[in-house]
Amino acid sequence: MNVAGDIAASEQSLRRFLHGLPGVDEVGARARAETLATRSIKTDSKRHAIDLAIAMIDLTTLEGQDTPGKVRAMCAKARQPGYGAPPVAAVCIYPDLVPEAVAGVAGSTVRVASVATSFPSGRAALDVKLADVKSAVAAGADEVDMVIDRGAFLTGRYGLVYEEIIAVRAACGDAHLKVILETGELSTLDNVRRASWLAMLAGADFIKTSTGKVTPAATLPVTLVMLEAVRDYRDFADRQVGVKPAGGIRTEKDAIRYLVLVNETVGEDWLNPRYFRIGASSLLNDLLMQRERMATGRYSGPDYMTVD
Amino acid sequence: MRFEYSPAPESRAVVTLRDSYGLFIGGAFVPGSSVFKTISPASEEVLAEVTHAGPEDVDRAVAAARQAYERTWSAMPGRERGKYLFRIARLIQERSRELAVLETMDNGKPIRESRDVDVPLAAAHFFYHAGWADKLGYAGFGPSPRPLGVVGQVIPWNFPLLMLAWKVAPALACGNTVVLKPAETTPLTALLFAEICQQADLPPGVVNIVTGDGATGQALVAHPGIDKVAFTGSTEVGKEIARACAVSGKRLTLELGGKAANVVFDDAPVDQAVEGIVNGIFFNQGHVCCAGSRLLVQESVYDEVLAALRRRMGTLRLGDPLDKNTDVGAINSRAQLDKISELVSSGEAEGASRWSAPCPLPDRGFWFAPTVFTEVSQAHRIAREEIFGPVLSVLTFRTPAEAVEKANNTPYGLSAGVWTEKGSLILWMASRLRAGVVWANTFNRFDPSSPFGGYKESGFGREGGRHGLEAYLDATGNADV
């Protein structure tokens, strides 16, 4: 990528480029997200949206208490959520549990995504982060969710962040790279836009909002700005990058608001699991419950939803 | 994968339409001289029969207002008047769904807008002015400013309930009584408001509502029993009213047309600017006196902004105004549709280049696709005349000085928008733009505490805020009671 290479030729040229991007007006972006959140999705369109949302889920467990048993159970649910629903897009786990996940989803379309680079803080030496990535990929991860160095970003050392993503990109081999911006720590929407471009220039296949360990996690205005960034980046570099909001998306209503946001910001090109994912855990059960209600006209109740 | 939205219509069941509505005079609905019909502009379906008030009906209404002014309202302490206004505000909130659905049916505007903008703002105006009712001595018009008397108010069809609130709330808070004439094509929410006045136990005659056409309005503003006239509508009619009120001793405020410039600089937040352009001209089908109908774009970002604008216009959802996902509703009347069509034809004939969003129009009702004209020059009619429809004229500029010069080059001066990330440029522009409202990095934002009104042929007087009270108060103590 020569264009990216020129832009990133020096810390100064990278800074000039990122600071030359059009600003984001916070009030306006919030107002746009709020308006789209009032869209009313009913009947057939709701049925369609529920199944689409299920197919876009990265079913996630990222806890210190995770065990092989927990991961196996989650993989079973990912393959067969039940009630005739389609499988989810991927399972997302810590690197040491990749072998369990690979075995758990074997023979299905479900992909294995592993967080890496000293998730969630990213506070480790580069060679440690790269070793983390390599171990996940060697164990069979299809996708790597890395975190950027927010400390470096916030002090304006964009080149450092860029080089780190390039190095992780190389360590990923054929695995898809999702770059977590941790937008809750970047704080402003201008930073979100700059970080999105930085990640895309460095070769991200996906840009992802959050680790889920920081509040706020994914929000509609942040996702709106990231969607605008991938849309503009495709015009700029002729390459389509995916978006993954993660954290805090718990209900069917939340999920549909994100799909509406995608639909009316970037359109149908992004309305598939190749280019849009939702990182979530409890969301799946709510989607299944609403799916069941659409089919039968009544709620079955939480006892009928499996806890995994 | 395509994601189509299924129809999501708001239920009409919440509204109980009567077959026929009388005039609201002296606290009761009374018959008048003749009747006319009001239709839904989205389907041309007849909604109800409404009474046309003749001169003798206007006489009765003014007499009822005079009596209420002298016997109850002007003598009532401000804190008591305030209680009525608070009660009306709360009733508007309680009946907000009903008001929103009825407004959308009668006016053609999307339910999203009547629900999220018109009705909440109408309630906010009553809440705001309820608070002023017992504090008028602190508004800066002397220690005990007095009311003017009976106020004649004529309002337009673009925001029927909201314009009623802008007019009625300050008048009542200041101790005046009111005879209000809603627009001919949109009388129904005013009549529902009359029911709300009854429900609030507002003393009879404090608010009187006379429905009718231009002749009714003429009879009202020319009536010798009126102490003050407030009008919102076209500049043409505003001038007639000014002539009719001249040397009559009547106080007058006018809020008239506009041809606002929305100025986009090369450092603007582009995505939000595009939202602001869309909101500026397509909000309420462009039936907005302060609509940003002239887009002034700095030449260095012209291609980028226009491409983003066309892309965004492609996502606008035009159709059934009661559908909760509709962005652009129906044109309010056939007459207005004809006027828009005529001006758009002139734009094409004069050589501007037209592009309309590719959205199918319903078969029945009055519709116009969101439209943008490029290659427009200041000399074109579409750059000078108020279209009052979803039609945007795009012009360009090179420097801030040129932007100011072009923005001010109009007989109007109601509003303007400035889009830039540079705060000093916003202030520089705002001090030079000859417009009553200058929005910075936003457009079409309203608040009862913010005064609104025009320069030049956009009228005079302010509505809202402390400034708006002045129109309904006699600070000199010379009011002819």
Image (cartoon, coloured by chain):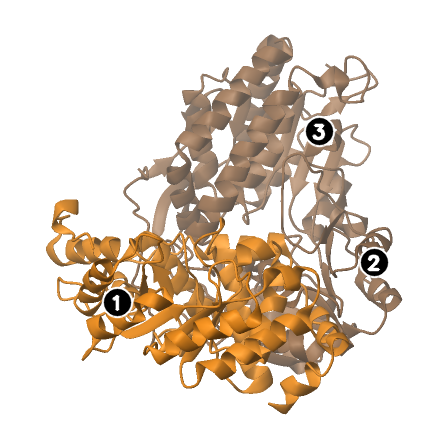
Chain colours: A orange, B brown
Does B432 sit left or right of A276 as displayed?
right
Crowd band around label 2 with a 10 angstrom C-alpha radius: few (<14), some (14–19), many (20+): some
Gap between marks 3 and 1 measured at Cα:
58 Å
- Quadrant location of the N terminus of chain A? bottom right
Residue drawn 34% across the image and 67% down it:
A96
Type of amino acid at the residue the image marks with label 1 = His
Type of amino acid at the residue the image marks with label 3 = Lys
Asked if residue B307 can be seen in this view, the reply is yes
Chain containing the residue with disc 3: B
Q: Which residue is mark 3?
A: B228
Q: Which residue is mark 2?
A: B425
For mark 1, give the secondary structure.
helix
Crowd band around label 3 with a 10 angstrom C-alpha radius: few (<14), some (14–19), many (20+): many
Q: Which residue is mark 1?
A: A48
Residue B341 location in percent, x, y? 56, 70
Q: Number of numbered discs present?
A: 3
